[in-house]
């Protein structure tokens, strides 16, 4: 099971956190600080796994961002690397060659995508296309609702003129 | 629009925060935004609720407190529109977790949304439930989730399946409800549903043995077929990763098969063909393929025996180890660790490669490899492997030295074929990385040395040689100092020369030099110095020619600023000057240390501060565990024949007791009477034994020792020049100590001083009749005002002897009373003697109520039973 997902920038800024196991606010801050220290300081050619408090943390760097996932001792690290890559590819398709700024200003979108990919700390969907389709459908629902709202407010505005 | 509401959009806020140059600026921006959001919350502003929540999530991610926004999530979830719900659920998952009580309020909204007509809203609710539900919510909403496992849209089914995992993890007894719907998910074609369904079955098997049996019987063939189909499926762009169709599904299927095959030969048999196919046909040039191979190997290793498959699996691991990719090597090592349980021989073949991995530049790989090597070692290969590891120790980097040292020491201890080899290896480790060695390790080494009597000479010479070469490794110096102290004569005279040894010429003054260096060296710690001082003291009788010089060195340390060293040197020089007759007996060689006791202790438990070494093992020299009333000549009698069998203490440090170097307790102010001294300085106890209060002669010797701890007798705080020994003789009556010899002063009777630890209380005639008088002396320990120690002294005022004397006391409930045995049960006539008895009273209402006690004294006089009773109300007020 994936216990949490962290996105940390090269500078140690948190870009996304998702906790599938209960951690109090204090513990979360501590975990982020601790892992940030370990992972950001590892050299580029080393393996992508870190033993940490009886868990394993799998991380991978994409441009300026580190994607980290914490898993149990007996989970498959190589697969988690693949899941991270899967997530990155979906982000890439959604934002169109994603960069850190996309994830900062549209952090909620990144969360929506992650929620379509992982649930309860397990992989939910192995098809990038399906995830993209589901996100697009929900985005369009939001758009229609917005349009309706604005058209209603237009009608009201006109009526009260 | 209300005037407080912040007009900034989310995007603008993020921009403003990013523009901040300092943390203080950022805090200011966040504070302003939070104030605006709070104001909007108070206004119950609806138009910007979702925007405010989005802002709060961003602020939360930066690590600021956002608890005030929790209720906003609930309001958004309760609203009707999809956009509001979407952001509301996201906020719920980010800002709350299962332990917040607010979460319970959302149960009802969740239930409605799980039954919503819009499937995306159902999806949102499932997602939230799956990520943060508590056990209570899981129980409440399980039926809805179960129903959704059969929902028409596959995307809801897959979410419901994962949500069920959370539910059965939280409430395992719900597992059987999910068994049948889960098994029907395995027949699906949709990959998402299949993946989540397989995962659900895996987790069901983990929480319920019933489910495991059910799936074993009904699903194995289906699963094998699914795996075969997926492994043989032609290229499908939607699921393809590096030429493999859906590796995620592969891996999950293999994992479930592993659980089903484990411990069931029939099930294992069904899957061997497909496992062989996956293991042999999967491409291993990309990560995805290796991930499958890795999983497959693990499954092969876990299911019931199949020799052919295992060979295949170990070969795959061998390939992993020689892979250039660090990740692959890491998992290879990881897997070999499991494989070693199954087939140690096959793993041994890769020993050389594994040893290479210990030297890898990557800390994660080093660590794994070292653990694996540790498992690989057995009696037959311990020598070459240890040699390799010790060689590597020399070049390894600092952080890794601690780990590797610990492993080597434990290996050497476990598998050493001969004592001499063990000693040799330990010397190498100590001289290479002595500073990383834990105390137990060098303690164990000393015990082994002590037990190898034919190697004493060899060891002390070897130690002398290496410690001259590497003086900066402290634990090496300690062991060397100890051995020189004990076996110094063998060092000089080349006693017990072995053939393999190079002859070495060490003069007596060389050995003394080495000790002097250890005492004077700035870098070495107090423990080492104290040990060196003891060693010198011991050498004073071994090397008569150097004794003047040794005396000088010891005298120099009388002015040491460190109390411990000062005290020791004063004591030692006193012995050297005044007590030639007992010196040689005092500095005799330690008796052979008992290995069994040591290992028993080591295994016993962690040292606990309270019980640690308040009891001395019985095999100590000099019979110190004897009743203190015995003559001094007897005290020094080495045959400790009547020493009581001392219970082995649960913790504490055997060796430190023996060496008398446990420095911490000497200064540790243990405030309560319940915590006796945490260590016992044997040697100093030995010296101070003459000043111990004679407690009841009937009590065991152990009592004597422990009572001296209770009284916190400052151990041998003796001053050779002063005419008294300071001793907190709280429990001693002055009369009873008469006749005690002061060992160090030899001046006859001791002049005893009450060292007042707490406030002084006048003694009290607690009871007096025409025939009997009872006086109480009070004392308290500092820091524990509740507990009072009372020493009762009984005097016979009649002309007849009292026999069968028995004192009893009773106290009200707020007091706790502990009575020690009386010093005697015969009270001589006419005040010619007395009985003393110690009482310990704990007043739980200290300061509010004062002590009160009812007493009864029974005795026989002239063959007549006499009973005297009374109540004592006149205790000093503040006891």
Image (tube, coloured by chain):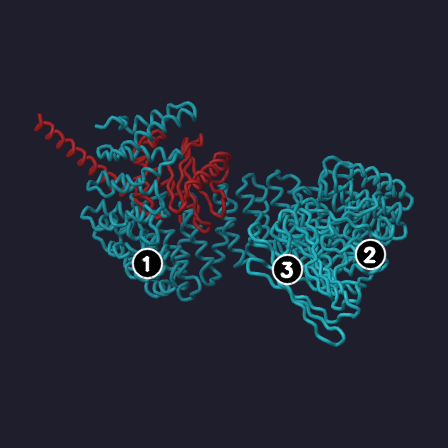
Chain colours: A red, B cyan
Q: Position of residue B494 (x, y in %)?
A: 86, 49
Secondary structure beneath dot 1 equals: helix
Q: Which residue is mark 2?
A: B738
Question: How far apart are the two marked residues, 2 and 1, measured between alpha carbons?
Answer: 95 Å
Q: Are marks 1 and 3 on the same chain?
A: yes
Task: Give the SS element for disc 3.
Answer: strand
Q: Nearer the viewer, residue B566 or B377?
A: B566
What's the mark number on residue B65? Answer: none
Callout 2 secondary element: loop
Residue at the disc numbered 1: B225
Of residue A156 and residue A140, the one placed in the foreground of this image is A156
> Mark 2 or 3, which is nearer the eye?
3
Image coordinates for residue B1, horizontal then vertical, percent: 21, 28
Compared with residue A37, is residue B670 higher up or lower down, i.e. above or below?
Answer: below
CA neighbours of label 3 inside 10 A, class few (<14), some (14 to 19), many (20+):
few
**Left or right: A58 in relation to A117:** right
| Residue B393 sits in quarter | top right
B129 relative to B556, above or below? below
Q: Compare residues B72 and B817 and report the one nearer the observer.
A: B817
Position of residue B564 in the picture relative to residue A19 (left or right): right
> Image quadrant of residue B94?
top left
Upstream in the sequence, badge 2 or badge 1?
1
Q: Chain under label 2? A: B
Residue B801 position, x and y percent, is 78, 70
Disc 2 to disc 3, C-alpha distance: 30 Å
The lab-note entry on whether marks 2 and 1 share a chain reads: yes
Which dot marks residue B872? 3
> Residue visible at 43% across and 24% down?
B22
Mark toward the start of the polypeptide (1 vs 3): 1
- The crowding category of the residue bearing disc 1, from other C-alpha atoms within 10 Å (few below 14, some 14 to 19, many at least 20), is some
Whether residue A90 appears in this view of the structure is no
Q: Residue lying at the far bottom in this picture: please name it.
A: B863
């Amino acid at each position: 099971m994936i216990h949490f997902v962290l996105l940390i920038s090269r500078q140690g800024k948190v870009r996304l956190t998702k906790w599938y196991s209960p951690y109090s606010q204090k513990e979360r801050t501590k975990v982020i600080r601790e892992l940030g220290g370990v992972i950001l300081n590892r050299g580029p050619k080393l393996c992508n796994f870190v033993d940490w408090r009886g868990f394993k943390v799998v991380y991978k760097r994409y441009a300026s961002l580190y994607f980290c996932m914490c898993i149990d001792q007996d989970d498959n690290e190589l697969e988690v690397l693949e899941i991270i890559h899967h997530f990155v590819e979906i982000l890439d398709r959604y934002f169109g060659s994603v960069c850190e700024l996309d994830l900062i200003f549209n952090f909620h979108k990144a969360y929506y995508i992650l929620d379509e990919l992982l649930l309860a700390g397990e992989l939910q969907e192995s098809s990038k296309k399906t995830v993209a389709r589901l996100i697009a459908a929900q985005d369009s629902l939001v758009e229609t609702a917005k349009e309706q709202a604005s058209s209603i407010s237009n009608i009201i505005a006109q009526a009260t003129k | 629009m209300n005037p407080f509401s912040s007009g900034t959009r989310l995007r603008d806020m993020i921009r403003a925060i990013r523009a901040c140059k300092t943390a203080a600026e950022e805090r200011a921006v966040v504070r302003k935004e939070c104030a605006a959001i709070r104001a909007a919350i108070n206004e119950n502003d609806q138009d910007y609720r979702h925007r405010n929540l989005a802002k709060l999530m961003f602020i939360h991610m930066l690590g600021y407190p956002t608890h005030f926004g929790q209720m906003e999530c609930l309001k958004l979830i309760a609203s009707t529109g999809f956009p509001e719900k979407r952001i509301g659920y996201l906020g719920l998952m980010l800002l709350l977790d299962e332990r917040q009580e607010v979460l319970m309020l959302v149960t009802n909204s969740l239930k409605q949304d799980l039954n919503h007509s819009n499937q995306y809203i159902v999806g949102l609710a499932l997602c939230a439930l799956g990520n943060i539900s508590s056990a209570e919510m899981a129980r409440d909403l399980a039926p809805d989730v179960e129903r959704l496992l059969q929902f028409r849209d596959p995307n809801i089914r897959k979410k419901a399946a994962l949500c069920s995992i959370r539910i059965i993890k939280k409430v395992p007894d719900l597992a059987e409800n999910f068994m049948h719907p889960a098994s029907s998910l395995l027949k699906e074609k949709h990959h998402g549903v299949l993946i989540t369904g397989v995962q659900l079955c895996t987790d069901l098997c983990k929480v319920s043995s019933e489910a495991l049996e059910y799936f074993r019987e009904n699903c194995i063939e289906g699963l094998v077929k699914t795996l075969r189909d997926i492994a043989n499926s032609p290229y499908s762009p939607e699921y393809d990763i590096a030429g493999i169709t859906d590796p995620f599904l592969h891996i999950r299927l293999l994992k479930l098969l592993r659980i089903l095959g484990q411990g069931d030969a029939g099930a294992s048999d069904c899957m061997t063909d497909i496992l062989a196919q996956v293991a042999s046909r999967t491409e291993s040039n990309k990560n995805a393929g290796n991930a499958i191979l890795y999983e497959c190997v693990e499954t092969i290793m876990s299911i019931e025996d199949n020799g052919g498959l295992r060979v295949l699996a170990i070969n795959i691991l061998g390939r992993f180890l020689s892979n250039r990719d660090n990740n692959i090597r890491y998992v290879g090592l990881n897997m070999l660790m499991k494989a070693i349980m199954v087939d140690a021989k096959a793993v041994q073949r890769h020993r050389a490669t594994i040893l290479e991995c210990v030297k890898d530049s990557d800390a994660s790989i080093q660590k794994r490899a070292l653990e694996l090597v540790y498992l690989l070692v057995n009696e037959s290969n311990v020598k070459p492997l240890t040699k390799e590891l010790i060689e590597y120790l020399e070049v390894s980097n600092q952080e890794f030295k601690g780990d590797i040292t610990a492993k080597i020491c434990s290996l050497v201890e476990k598998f050493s074929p001969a004592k001499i080899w063990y000693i040799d290896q330990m010397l190498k480790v100590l001289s290479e990385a002595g500073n990383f060695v834990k105390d137990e390790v060098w303690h164990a080494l000393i015990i082994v040395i002590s037990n190898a009597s034919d190697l004493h000479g060899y060891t002390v010479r070897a130690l002398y040689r290496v410690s001259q070469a590497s003086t900066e490794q402290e634990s090496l110096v300690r062991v060397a100092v100890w051995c020189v102290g004990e076996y110094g004569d063998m060092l000089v005279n080349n006693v017990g020369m072995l053939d393999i040894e190079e002859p070495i010429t060490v003069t007596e003054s060389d050995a003394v030099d080495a000790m002097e260096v250890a005492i004077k060296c700035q870098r070495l710690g107090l423990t080492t110095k104290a040990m060196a001082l003891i060693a010198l003291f011991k050498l004073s009788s071994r090397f008569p020619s150097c004794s003047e010089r040794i005396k000088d060195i010891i005298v120099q340390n009388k002015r040491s600023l460190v109390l411990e060293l000062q005290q020791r040197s004063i004591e030692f020089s006193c012995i050297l000057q005044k007590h030639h007759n007992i010196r040689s007996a005092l500095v005799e060689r330690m008796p052979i240390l008992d290995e069994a006791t040591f290992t028993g202790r080591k295994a016993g438990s962690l040292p606990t501060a309270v019980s640690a070494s308040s009891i001395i093992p019985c095999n100590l020299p000099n019979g110190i565990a004897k009743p203190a009333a015995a003559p001094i000549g007897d005290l020094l009698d080495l045959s400790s024949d009547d020493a009581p069998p001392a219970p082995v203490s649960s913790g504490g440090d055997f060796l430190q007791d023996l060496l008398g170097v446990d420095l911490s307790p000497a200064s540790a102010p243990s405030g309560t009477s319940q915590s006796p001294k945490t260590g016992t300085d044997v040697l100093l106890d030995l010296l101070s034994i003459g000043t111990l209060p004679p407690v009841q002669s009937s009590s065991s010797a152990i009592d004597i020792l422990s009572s001296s701890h209770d009284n916190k007798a400052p151990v041998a705080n003796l001053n050779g020049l002063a005419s008294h020994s300071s001793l907190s003789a709280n429990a001693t009556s002055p009369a009873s100590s008469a006749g005690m010899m002061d060992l160090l002063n030899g001046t006859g009777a001791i002049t005893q001083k009450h060292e007042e630890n707490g406030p002084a209380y006048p003694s009290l005639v607690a009871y007096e009749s025409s025939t009997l008088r009872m006086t109480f002396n009070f004392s308290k320990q500092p820091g524990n005002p509740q507990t009072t120690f009372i020493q009762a002294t009984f005097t016979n005022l009649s002309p007849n002897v009292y026999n069968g004397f028995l004192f009893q006391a009773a106290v009200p409930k707020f007091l706790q009373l502990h009575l020690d045995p009386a010093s005697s049960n015969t009270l001589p006539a006419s005040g010619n003697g007395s009985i003393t008895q110690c009482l310990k009273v704990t007043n739980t209402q200290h300061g509010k109520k004062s002590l009160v006690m009812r007493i009864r004294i029974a005795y026989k006089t002239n063959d007549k039973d006499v009973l005297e009773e009374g109540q004592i109300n006149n205790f000093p007020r503040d006891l």
